[in-house]
């Protein structure tokens, strides 16, 4: 079971006789829309942040974000059991519902709860729930707070609510590795399946908008001026725009999926990760993660058709990713680059899962949406984005996730068959 | 295919009964209590006043003033534990990637489990916010809060460039982190893993358990008929994991081997365990399967044993489900009777306790166990440490949300 290659992540997965893990369904919620609308919305060239009610009286000059404003948990999930779920739990349960519906397992039918696990990522958890609980206790009295709100202060609650709602008992894990958390969740889910804990895993990420996160980003000077769209890689970019959303993907061994008649949408082919102790976004760290993922997938840079980048409009961060792309891809073999955060905003720990869902959509439809709001790019894509659906066979997608904490991870998806 | 054997080569503990491995172990073998009136916050609005705070932690002993000043208490604990554990493992005192001589720093990983993370940072933010208004909150506090900063701070402090994981699976966080470290070595991603758990004393956690009526009023009494609840505590532990062959080749002291771990999920309720202990049993069975150990080979079980009426009853039931008649022959104890519930640190500290039980042949006791409960009828090593040779130990940790886990630790040979 153990791969011996020094820099491999999922190494061993592709060796003879070992299972290949595939994605068989994907559900996503974000600013572009809910479910099918999310994916259809990605093809729009322009995405603008919207006013967020909670930000209006935060005392900061930033009131706009990429809110998932068309999402109604009640409409999607029904009102039953929603009362104590906070925004994070509602988002991830919604994405799980969409994923299960696509897998033909709505309501859990056709999915064996005993052998299905859940691994989801979040960088902040429901920081709004934690802060509200604490402030209510301080302002009123500890006896004033509702004990039913206490579970929302532990970071693993959103993921656990998915397991509870659909009776998924194999395992349940939450991972909080900053902005690379949900790509790391794929790696962990595959290890858990290799360990025999689960035959299928719902892998995902979730992040909610909160005043607390807004204050944090604002004080770090990371935010674009209010109302400006996120402009990843664009020369005049002035910062990130916060977003919220969730994505959940069903990952299982190819043989298992075939047995129950679920179509493989993509193979989870490789993973790489790095940490730069010096802090900040470092091009060499991003490049190290990308190379490790390509090596793990036994894919050469020239074979990559599309990179779903993590660039979100940060002047320094996007420049670091552009430099890493230039480093990994020689000038003659440059893939198209799709900067999905121009459509969904900076969704921190959920970014990788939303990007993976977008990559699956690109591969399924054979289309690369235009990088939104980009204008002329710092990084010149090798092939024209926005091509006709179905005209571009996309066989290899590389997904990046990185953050200012020094973490970077990359995931390679390949076309099945 | 046989699994790669994984060695524990260094350990460190920061606990309510003291900082440092020897101090911790001597105290819990003596039955010393670390539970006292809480000083970290004002307990006057609460009926219960006690918890377990670390009495002797001096950040300056392990961190530079600059490091200490930019970290919350969780990161301070985690960095200190990591440095003590690396020192114990004979890996020196690296502070940058260049300091890792015989090890590739790209292959040094950090995995830290936690329940509340840097919650004292959040509590400071809320205190400013409610007292003097939102605008009075020092801006730099926000960046110190996200849970991912804890392993990132550890990696920066020791120059680790490998996989860096924060695993907030609540009160099972330590076991999940050690399990992830086990996997990182197995899949060839790491040669050295610093794995552990951490939680600082938390007003939020205390408030929540208070409102759930889950706090022990005077002392923590796991498995006792009259048990009233848990004691909220703080602490940290770190274990250095390496491939056994590599550890032996570099002449390291192999303290024990991690044979395997297992996970499960109650899928029942966010705060109440499954009445039959289904997820707990699933985790124990999975751990024994991965470890290749039969129930009859297990010599000791370190219980989750929080002291709440529900946990101790269902955990006992789950142990009987998995071990059958052998359950009555296997000593089971809860060190939470002495140090309280250190949340995400608990299972990391208990993993260390299992290694020490194996190395010393002493089982730590379950203190304050005075009245047998007909529903908790196993051998809980009541009130006094016991000499007993241990080769294989199982350590349980179950969390809010129903996230369950078990770890299997064994002596060499």
Image (cartoon, coloured by chain):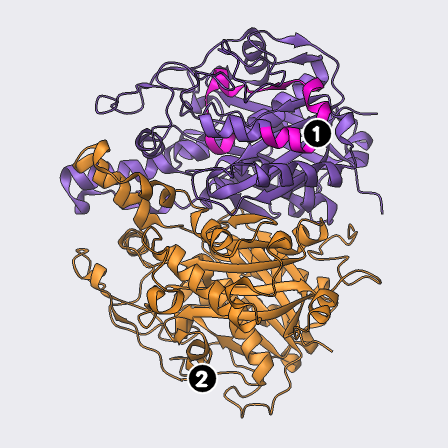
Chain colours: A orange, B purple
Q: Chain of mark 1?
A: B
Would you say residue B237 is visible in this rendering?
no
Q: Position of residue B289 (x, y in %)?
A: 75, 40
Check residue A103 for magenta coloring: no
Which numbered disc, 2 or 1, marks the residue closer to the eye? 1
The range drawn in magenta is B317-345
Element at badge 1? Answer: helix
Q: Kindly identify which numbered label has been placed on residue A43.
A: 2
Q: Are marks 2 and 1 in contact (CB under 8 Å)?
A: no
Q: Chain of mark 2?
A: A
User: Mark 2 Cα within 10 Å, few/some/many (few <14, many 20+)?
Assistant: some
Q: Kindly identify which numbered label has been placed on residue B287.
A: none
Q: Nearer the viewer, residue A197 or A7?
A: A197
Check residue B321 for magenta coloring: yes
Would you say residue A304 is visible in this rendering?
yes
Q: Kindly identify which numbered label has been placed on residue B323.
A: 1
Q: Position of residue B120 (x, y in %)?
A: 34, 34
Q: Nearer the viewer, residue A161 or A248?
A: A161
Residue A318 image-quadrant placement: bottom left
């Amino acid at each position: 079971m153990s791969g011996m290659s020094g820099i491999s992540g999922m190494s061993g997965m592709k060796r003879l006789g070992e299972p290949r893990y595939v994605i068989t369904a994907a559900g996503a919620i974000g600013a572009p829309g809910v479910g099918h609308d999310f994916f259809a919305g990605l093809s729009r060239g322009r995405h603008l942040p919207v006013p967020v009610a909670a930000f209006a009286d935060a005392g900061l000059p930033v009131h706009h974000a990429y809110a998932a404003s068309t999402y109604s948990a009640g409409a999607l999930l029904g009102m039953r059991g929603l009362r104590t779920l906070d925004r994070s739990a509602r988002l991830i349960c919604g994405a799980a519902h969409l994923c299960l519906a696509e897998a033909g397992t709505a309501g859990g039918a056709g999915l064996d709860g005993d052998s299905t696990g859940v691994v989801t990522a979040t960088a902040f958890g429901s920081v709004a729930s934690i802060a509200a609980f604490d402030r209510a206790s301080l302002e009123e009295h500890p006896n004033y707070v509702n004990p039913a709100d206490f579970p929302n202060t532990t970071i693993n609650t959103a993921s656990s609510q998915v397991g509870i709602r659909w009776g998924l008992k194999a395992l349940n894990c939450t991972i909080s590795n900053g902005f690379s958390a949900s790509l790391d969740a794929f790696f962990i889910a595959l290890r858990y399946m290799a360990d025999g804990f689960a035959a299928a895993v719902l892998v995902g990420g979730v992040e909610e908008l909160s005043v607390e996160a807004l204050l944090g980003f604002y004080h770090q000077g990371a935010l674009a001026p209010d109302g400006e769209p996120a402009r990843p890689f664009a020369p005049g970019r002035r910062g990130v725009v916060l977003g919220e959303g969730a994505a959940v993907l069903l990952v299982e061994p190819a043989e298992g999926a075939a047995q129950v008649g679920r179509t493989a949408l993509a193979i989870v082919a490789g993973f790489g990760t790095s940490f730069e102790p010096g802090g900040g976004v470092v091009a060499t760290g991003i490049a190290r993660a990308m190379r490790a993922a390509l090596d793990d997938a036994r894919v050469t840079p020239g074979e990559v058709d599309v990179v779903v980048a993590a660039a979100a409009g940060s002047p320094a961060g996007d420049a670091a990713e552009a430099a890493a792309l230039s480093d990994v891809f020689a000038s003659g073999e440059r893939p198209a680059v799709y900067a999905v955060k121009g459509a969904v905003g900076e969704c921190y720990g959920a970014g990788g899962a939303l990007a993976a869902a977008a990559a699956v959509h690109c591969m399924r439809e054979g289309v690369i949406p235009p990088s939104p709001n980009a204008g002329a790019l710092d990084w010149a894509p090798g092939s024209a984005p926005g091509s006709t659906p179905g005209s571009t066979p996309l066989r290899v997608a590389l997904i990046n996730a990185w953050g200012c904490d020094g973490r970077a991870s990359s995931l390679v998806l390949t076309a099945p068959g | 295919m046989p699994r790669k054997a994984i060695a524990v080569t260094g350990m460190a503990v920061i606990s309510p009964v003291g900082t440092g491995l020897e101090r911790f172990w001597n105290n819990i073998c003596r039955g010393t209590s670390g539970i006292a009136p809480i000083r970290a916050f004002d307990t006057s609005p609460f009926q219960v006043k006690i918890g377990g705070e670390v009495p002797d932690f001096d950040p300056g002993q392990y961190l530079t003033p600059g490091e200490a000043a930019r970290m919350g208490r969780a990161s301070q604990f985690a960095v200190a534990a990591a440095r003590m554990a690396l020192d114990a493992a004979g890996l020196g005192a690296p502070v940058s990637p260049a300091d890792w001589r015989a090890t590739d720093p790209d292959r040094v990983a950090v995995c830290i489990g936690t329940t509340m993370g840097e919650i004292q940072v959040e509590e400071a933010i809320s205190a400013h916010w409610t007292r003097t208004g939102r605008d009075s909150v020092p801006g730099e506090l926000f960046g110190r809060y996200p849970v991912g900063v804890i392993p990132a701070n550890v990696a920066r402090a020791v120059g680790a460039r490998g996989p860096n994981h924060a695993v907030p699976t609540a009160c099972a966080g330590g076991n999940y982190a050690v399990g992830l470290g086990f996997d990182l070595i197995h899949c060839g991603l790491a040669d050295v893993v610093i794995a552990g758990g951490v939680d600082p004393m938390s007003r939020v956690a205390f408030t929540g358990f208070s409102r759930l009526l889950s706090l022990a009023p005077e002392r923590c009494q796991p498995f006792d008929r009259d048990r009233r609840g848990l004691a909220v505590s703080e602490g940290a532990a770190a274990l250095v994991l390496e491939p056994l062959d590599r550890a032996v080749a570099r002449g390291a002291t192999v303290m024990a081997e991690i044979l395997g771990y297992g996970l499960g999920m109650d899928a029942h309720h966010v705060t109440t365990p499954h009445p039959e202990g289904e997820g707990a049993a699933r985790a124990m069975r999975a751990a024994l399967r991965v470890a290749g150990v039969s129930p009859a080979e297990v010599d000791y079980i370190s219980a989750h044993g929080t002291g709440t009426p529900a946990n101790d009853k269902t955990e006992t039931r789950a142990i009987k489900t998995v071990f059958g008649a052998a359950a009555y022959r296997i000593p089971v104890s809860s060190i939470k009777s002495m140090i309280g519930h250190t949340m995400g640190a608990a299972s990391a500290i208990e993993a260390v306790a299992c290694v020490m039980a194996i190395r010393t042949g002493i089982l730590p006791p379950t203190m304050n166990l005075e009245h047998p409960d007909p529903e908790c009828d196993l051998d809980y090593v009541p009130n006094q440490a016991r000499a007993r040779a241990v080769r294989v130990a199982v350590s349980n940790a179950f969390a809010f949300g129903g996230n369950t886990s078990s770890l299997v630790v064994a002596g060499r040979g």
